[in-house]
Image (cartoon, rainbow, N blue to C red):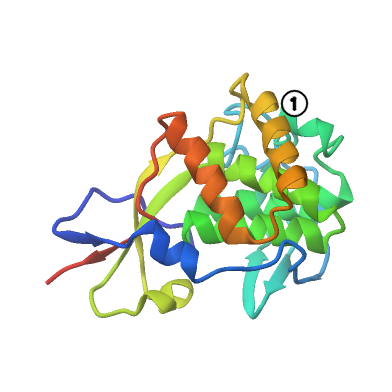
Amino acid sequence: MNAQIMPTMTPTAHVPLAALLACCVRPLHACGAFSGDPAFGAAEASDRVFYRKGGPTHALTKAFSFNHEGTVWSAPIGAATDGACLPEWARTIVPTSMEPAFAKAAILHDHHCLVAERTYLETHRMFFHALVAAGLAPTKAAALYAAIVVAGPTWTILLPTGLPIGSATERAPIRVIDRTDAIYVDPGMGALLAELGERIAVEGLDDIETLERLAIQHRLNLDLPLPAPIRVLEG
């Protein structure tokens, strides 16, 4: 089900990023398991274009999913991804968008950024774990993941009061506000990816929390918006 972009509702309470980050300290080798393989038909899904508006997109004709620690991320029949979704700067790690170690994770990430059923941090984390599960080296996946946190799309999910934050991935009907677009085509992304990759290797970053904090600091340094992943409606 596609989430609807709704006007900002007040009053709301922000859930601090630190609270969400603290609940997910995971080693970089943690991953998960796929069920099924994606398949595409000849028809284009021109109503869903992710990184390059007006470019070609391809709709799934076979659903597949990814299970990470009991949370299932599905890409249903009809979900779409574009053939140019791999930015040039990322090709130093993954040569083509249909590289087996990239394609499944990218398709799932495209779809869940569109429907925004979970927070952007959860969605970006899934991308990392799916990359590793598909066979990409953890350090390479970590560099791509950090770049996604810096430059990827964001949004805020509104939750009704009284719903535990821990229920965020099993929430009732949601509203999504404050969407920001990805800036993957920014000319500085290549240098940023190289810097992130070097720090990951040199400093031996070994958990998601540390990696996210590094990426979020880069995002703030670039004056990019960083909306609260969740707001709780009060009253």
> Quick one: 208 or 178, which is closer to the camera?
208
Q: Residue furthest front?
A: 203
| Residue 155, x across and y down, in percent | 41, 49
The quadrant the C terminus occupies is: bottom left
Q: Quadrant of residue 173?
A: bottom left
Residue displayed at 21% across by 66% down:
233
Secondary structure of the residue carrying tag 1 is helix
Residue 25 image point, x, y percent: 58, 68
Residue corresponding to mark 1? 88
> Is residue 199 shown above or below 134?
above
Residue 27 horizontal side relative to residue 176, left or right: right
Residue at 58% of width from left, 55% of height from top? Answer: 210
Instruction: State the image coordinates of residue 224 (x, y, percent, origin top left).
Output: 42, 33
Q: How many marks?
A: 1
Q: Is residue 1 above or below residue 198?
A: below
Q: Is residue 100 visible?
A: yes
Residue at the image position 80 percent from the left and 39 percent from the top:
97
Q: Quadrant of residue 162?
A: bottom left
**Hey, what amino acid is under mark 1?**
Glu
Which residue is pictured at 65% across the width and 61% down the height? 207
Where is 182 relative to 2, above or below? above
Please name whichever residue, 115 or 142, is drawn nearer the observer in this view of the structure.
142
Q: State the image coordinates of residue 2 (x, y, percent, origin top left).
A: 47, 57
Residue 78 visible, this angle: no
- Relative depth, front residue between 205 and 103: 205
Vertical placement of residue 105 versus 31, above or below: above
Answer left or right for 201 relative to 225: right
Q: Residues within 10 Å of mark 1 (few under 14, many from 20)?
A: some
